Amino acid sequence: MAKTLSCESLHHAVYAAPDVLRHCCKRFFVDGKMKGDVEISDVTSDVDISYDRIREKKKKLHEDINQGKETPCTGCPWLTEREWPSWDKLDISLVSIEHHTVCNLRCTYCSDMYYGGKKPSYSIKHLFKNLSDHGALNQRLSLVWGGGEPMLFGSFDTIFSFIADKYKPVNNNVFTNAVRHSSAIEKYLRRREINITVSMDAGTSETFKLVRGRDRFTAVLENLARYHNAGGDKVIIKYILMPENSSKKEVMAFVDCIKQYGLEKCSFQISADFKDEVISDEVIAAAGLLLESLKKLGAEMINFDYHLRPRVRKALEQRTYDTASNKGAFESVIVWGAGEYALRMLEQKSLSKSIKFFVDSDPVKQGGEIDGIKIKPPSDILSEKNSLIFIASSQYYRDIYHELLDMGVSADKILDANLF
């Protein structure tokens, strides 16, 4: 099979918005202009979400990219050349369900793409049935629930339970603002079958209202406490740093709230405004302060997400200082994850020269290669006693970390992903 340019999302993902299906949710900058959120097609009814339509649209974009045509993907850093699957059959391993844009907050970093009040123009159940009937859903299916605010879709608890029970995703991730409580979310947290991510973005009610549009600070913290009691570190608290919430006073007030509400054992994700191509010194300093302060509080699951990490690295490189380089090269590193994040690792000389092999839980990827480096099953880690391990995932960092511990891998062999 010949090597072609493509990406994981184009081949293996569907993002279901109210009136459009998308290939991806990636955003990137070309000549200072943000691109991304590449569309498959407009949707006005269930007819527009047919299996054949989705497959043909994906196939056509792939062909256009490799014929050198100008496409919405032109300039995307996530495109990579390798042997990609044929288009004879779709193999969808990620479905992102963001099929309405009704929201009860108005975050400054958001847009009407997510809070415009649009209702779905098709049945989300029909989309899943359509893909399932054609055998297009990968056995290791991951689901992401977003919006809009998922809770505001009238029958969320019912639809969520139906899809979770019928299609049994290996990863089920809900992005909610936690203004409202969901009995279904609490139930599946207790069953250890979902992760939820909640953006706080503030340490005080005043800043919460400034950044998120409404004063629901206390309600969110109270619901987080309920969810945490049910799911522990399967609750991910996110802090999106921007000028309005990056002062030392605000960051430390957030850390105090985490302690006050007993949320230290949640997972934490530190991010930045995706609209900013370059982040300020203040945001970089705040990211470091928040990371270290949460560690001192006893938090164990903390990582920079894919919006923040490359921006921090770029900023450090511009200052001719690279944290990873100053630590020196590692003798042997195993990278868990063989997706787009892993490709970014190959750009970092201090780490890439030391990569012994990649591992991935997806049997389809096992036996393949990335840039000439083998992809092996996770069990192969156990025979490498002297190698360190890097987790090449933001969204599934917590799950992979715990799987490594369950395999008997010592925590001190897992590299701090925030340094790279």
Image (cartoon, rainbow, N blue to C red):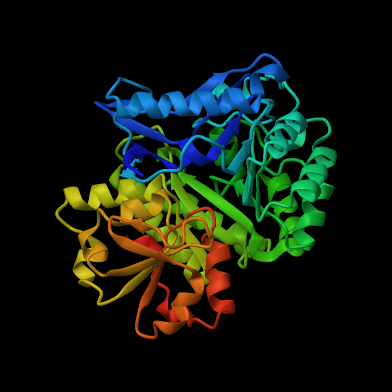
Q: Residue at x 18, y 58 (%)?
A: 321
Position in image of residue 296 (x %, y %):
48, 72
Q: Could you tell whether 222 is left or right of 287 in the image? A: right
> Where the C terminus falls, by quadrant?
bottom left
Q: Residue at x 52, y 41 (%)?
A: 12
Q: Residue at x 73, y 37 (%)?
A: 133
Which quadrant of the structure image shows residue 280?
Answer: top left
The residue lying toward the viewer, choosing from 322 and 404, is 404
> Where the N terminus falls, by quadrant?
top left
Relative vertical location of residue 40 with respect to residue 243 in this rendering, above or below: above
Which quadrant of the structure image shows residue 118?
Answer: top right
Q: Residue furthest top?
A: 44
Q: Residue furthest bottom?
A: 385
Position in image of residue 69 (x %, y %):
30, 20
Q: Could you tell whether 67 is left or right of 320 in the image? A: right
Position in image of residue 239 (x %, y %):
51, 49
